Amino acid sequence: MKKIAIIGGTGGQGTGLALRWARVGHEIFIGSREESKACSCADNLKAICIDVACTLLEIEKSDIQSIKERVPEAKISGFDNLEAAKKADIIVISVPYSHLIPTIASIKEALTEGKIIVSVVVPLSTAVGGKATTLMYPWEGSAAEVIQSLVPENVQVIGAFQNISAERLSDLENSVSSDVIVCGGSKDSRKNIMELAKDIPGIRAIDGGPLQNARLIEPITALIIGMNIRYKVKEGMGIRFTYLPE
Ligand SMILES: NC(=O)c1ccc[n+]([C@@H]2O[C@H](COP(=O)([O-])OP(=O)(O)OC[C@H]3O[C@@H](n4cnc5c(N)ncnc54)[C@H](OP(=O)(O)O)[C@@H]3O)[C@@H](O)[C@H]2O)c1
């Protein structure tokens, strides 16, 4: 089981990922700028995991004894962003693009050799008061490459989960029917994150090659947001590639 920090883990995308991974037994450290906010978020997420397990196992929520015996406690705890990053091997960055640079600076002390950073960040134009259906184009090429430019060389940076909606992730009663393109890092670290993607029911992980390809993957989210509006898909559309060899 993996130790995963989610920086900005109190937001929509972070809580969705935390719930999905905690349910399969990974240890989750919710990070926030405020430790108390992270702790109360972690408590809420644990309660959601218990609720969903009770429904699936047909246990009354008042039956504390059965819950204790049959529902494994989700391993979710809350910390400030730096402490969360220190505790984990995999650090997911899940903050709005406009706050990316100061957020990476705030956890720099925790970015030591062997750690893997996963960027779910999409540089939407909302960062500069624009629309969520258009993108900003960072000088480095993509949000994931902005992160790479800020961290030590021995830290692996991966881009993934940028095209999955928070609503779909949080809907634990349903699987997430989508492909997740995983790019960047070494082959091994990419494989590691592809395994993590496959832990979410319904998700198929696809090797997206080098981190540069985040330039092509991040904009898909702006496209999806526009299509969600046109087709009135409140929970968000997903993407699927066809004819991929097994
Ligand atoms: N939502 C989606 O459906 C979705 C889908 C795909 C990709 N994404 C990407 O995932 C990332 C997170 O999305 P989200 O919807 O979860 O965002 P969000 O809810 O707006 O924000 C996530 C967290 O970022 C932290 N934050 C807010 N303002 C900050 C600031 N000034 N400085 C540092 N941290 C700040 C907050 O945590 P604390 O206040 O606890 O510190 C907040 O809970 C974004 O880059 C987004 O593009 C989102």
Image: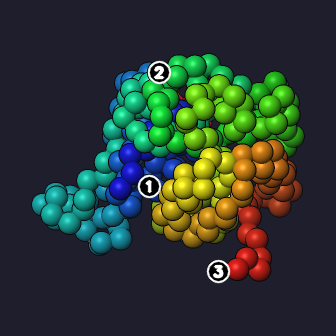
> Please, what is the three-letter code of the amino acid marked with disc 3?
Glu
Instruction: Quickly name the residue at label 2.
Output: 109
Q: Quadrant of the N terminus?
A: bottom left
> Please, what is the three-letter code of the amino acid marked with disc 2?
Glu
Residue 246 tag number: 3
Picture quadrant of ligand 1: top right
Q: Is residue 49 visible?
A: no
Residue 49: image x %, image y %?
36, 55
Residue 213: image x %, image y %?
78, 49
Q: Picture quarter containing residue 82?
A: top left
Instruction: Quickly name the residue at label 1.
Output: 21
Instruction: Give the distance between the C-alpha atoms of the residues marked 2 and 1, in whole angstroms.
Output: 25 Å
Residue placed most toward the observer, 144 or 120:
144
Badge 3 or badge 1: first in the primary sequence: 1
Which residue of the protein is positioned furthest toward the left in this rendering? 65
Task: Tell me the residue at 51%/33% (across/down).
Answer: 7
Category of crowding for the residue at label 1, using alpha-carbon neighbours closer than 10 angstroms: few (below 14), some (14–19), many (at least 20): many
Q: Element at badge 3?
A: loop
